[in-house]
Image (cartoon, coloured by chain):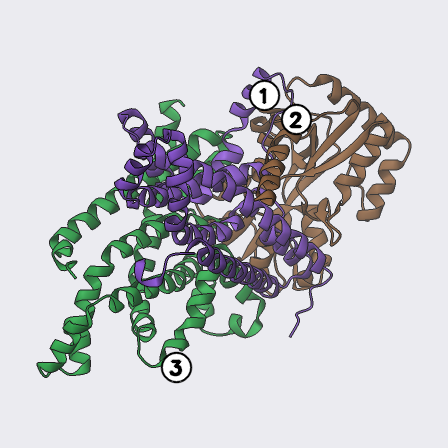
Amino acid sequence: MSWELLIKWLPDFLEGAWLTLQLVGVSVIAGLLFALPLGIARASRHPLVRALPYGYIFFFRGTPLLVQLFLVYYGLAQFEVIRQSFLWTYLRDPYWCAVITMTMHTAAYIAEILRGAIQSVPQGEVEAARALGMSRSQTLWHILLPRAARIGLPAYSNEVILMLKASALASTITLLELTGMARKVAARTYMYEEMFLVAGVIYLIIAFALMQGFKQLERWLRVDACQGR
Amino acid sequence: MKSLHKVLLAAAMTLACGSAFAAEKLRIGTEGAYPPFNLIDASGKVVGFDLDIAHALCAKMEVECEVVTSDWDGIIPALNANKFDFIIASMSITDEREQAVDFTKPYYTNKLQFVAPKSSDFKTDKESLDGKVIGAQRATIAGTWLEENLGDVVEIKLYDTQENAYLDLASGRLDGVLADKFVQWEWLKSETGKDFEFKGEPVFDNDKIGIAVREGNDELRERLNAALDEIVADGTYKQINDKYFPFSIY
Amino acid sequence: MIPDLHGFGAALLAGTWITIQLALASLALGLVLGLLGALAKTSPYPFFRWLGGTYSTIVRGVPELLWVLLIYFGTVNMVRVLGESLGIERLALSPFAAGTIALGLCFGAYATEVFRGALLAIPKGHREAGLALGLGKRRIFWRLILPQMWRIALPGLGNLFMILMKDTALVSVIGLEEVMRTSQIAVTASKEPFTFFLVAALIYLCLTIVAMTGMYFLERRAGRGFSRSAT
């Protein structure tokens, strides 16, 4: 591949990469917030509370993200009611459709990570906190969640990488993120191998940087020290 | 585990079958998502103007033809990869494409024209288009035309299929769609298209549509050209034309 | 509540069958690649360790959709040259073959890690016991190590298969008429995107349920002889 061409299209690729980062960043953070109540409910001792988020999680983990994306982007527009409502301000924009779908999708996965993490916090620690006179919610916020966060962090970092890769699907609803940009440039230049390889290398660089970032975060939070059970 | 073996075998066969070839059997490459020129009906058959022309040409050349579909993005790479022998998929003859493939004589002429809601005050001069959101299909002449002529004033959205662009026009995500006039005309006739209309004059009317063959395949190109002359001369072409459009598109 | 399928019911069923075939073919390829990757990663030779590690790192860092596009569009020239050198005139990847390779490649990269974990989980003593009994290296691997690995790796592989099954939807982008592509064709004809994408979602849910049930029985079978307390 000629370097000239690469330099000519590089700004487009970087623009695409920036959109990719936005999509991933917003959805994994919003997804985490949304997953908190879901995960806590899933770890509940009451069967009814436990069952409630199950349907949601089952649907979002059991169907492809591509289907979910098309349901939100093309599917919802089928209904006049939605197109008349205030929701349309956001749903007409592919950016928001991608962010909303990716958030709902990743929330289902993060909720399961949270549930696993909460359940692996030793029962004794919760009992100790209660014995010290902490209320239920105090125990949740001061003992259970901080411990669960450290236990779940490695799995969460995996999920972030998975979402980085999943964001490529946004190209199917007209967004020009990294994959969308590569497809656009490839269709114009007929240089498919080269353009897709460039995009692949950029994904690898982003994934590597994210993993390094999470390693630092784990060190800072002393995740290892907390794993002794 | 027996079934697993079978699946493996099936995968290997699929790999190998791309390489099978028969003496006088030509494979037609088309897209199948571009009504009325090429589309897939409920029975899975590819039909439309392009296919009618293709079958008429095959009959004149006295060869057996088989239809292969490919998505639009990859249709030229697929031709060069020998996935089929010629493309008849309403493809515009452009300089860029001519570096990758060879074209026959045009088999129809296309114009690009905007479509927008009847209720909207949509004008097609550059100033009025400022800030509008316009849709087109990825890797089409309409998409390229938009980028080259209006790229600095309108927001261009590119779709995998023309149908997806119409879904978004109907849902109000797009202010207008730029596409081939005949395609737009067909959609305007449909149930969802009834609230929309052509806006302005065609913005581009020198868009010749040809059949693409692999570079250097002059033998097939000449045979297709000869067959094309024949169907125009003997009225077959007009018959097909009239089946789809109330005006001549040759 | 059966939605009006506008005559696309049979096409959707055919699409489901393609999806199943694609998933199983990719699984077969992925298992082989994963096993090879794990063997390479645990090999005593640095070169093989490097090869296995590079494979799983690079493949896991790039989106599945990009692999599908790259293998379908990007290998056109390579495959043709390969075909010519083999004396085959029209060698080209069909969407099914390209999808199988792309998804098998991705499955294999993750399976490499699962198999490696399973390989390391088998006590060294078992291999030594085999050696003491005078078994050859190959027989130790096939008769002693592999059957035990299978049991340990099964839950991990099951999860990967669920992911693989959903990733088959990506192959619709290169025109393979599986569930997703068939739904899109139906949307074009019916103008009812919500209906048909919901039907597609339900088909995938059914496939997931079937796969989960299958996994349950496979795991139970593989776990024979291991009481709960022992594992």
Label 3 crowd bin: few (<14), some (14–19), many (20+), radius 10 Å? few
Can you say whether A8 is above or below B247 in the image? above
The image shows residue A224 at horizontal and vertical percentages of 14, 54
* Residue A126 in sight here: yes
Chain name for mark 1: C
* Foreground disc of the pair 3, 2: 3
Q: Which residue is mark 2?
A: B19
Left or right of C23 on screen, residue A180: left
Chain C as rendered: colour: purple
Outermost left residue: A132
Q: Quadrant of residue B192?
A: bottom right
Which chain shows up in green? A
CB-based contact (under 8 Å), mark 1 and mark 2: yes
Q: Secondary structure at mark 3?
A: helix
> Which corner quadrant holds the N terminus of chain C?
bottom right
Q: Which residue is mark 1?
A: C83
Left or right of C55 on screen, residue B128: right
Left or right of A112 on screen, residue A213: left
Outermost right residue: B234
Q: Which residue is mark 3?
A: A48
Q: Secondary structure at mark 2?
A: loop
Which residue type does callout 2 highlight? Ser
CB-based contact (under 8 Å), mark 1 and mark 3: no
Q: Nearer the viewer, residue B83 or A140?
A: A140
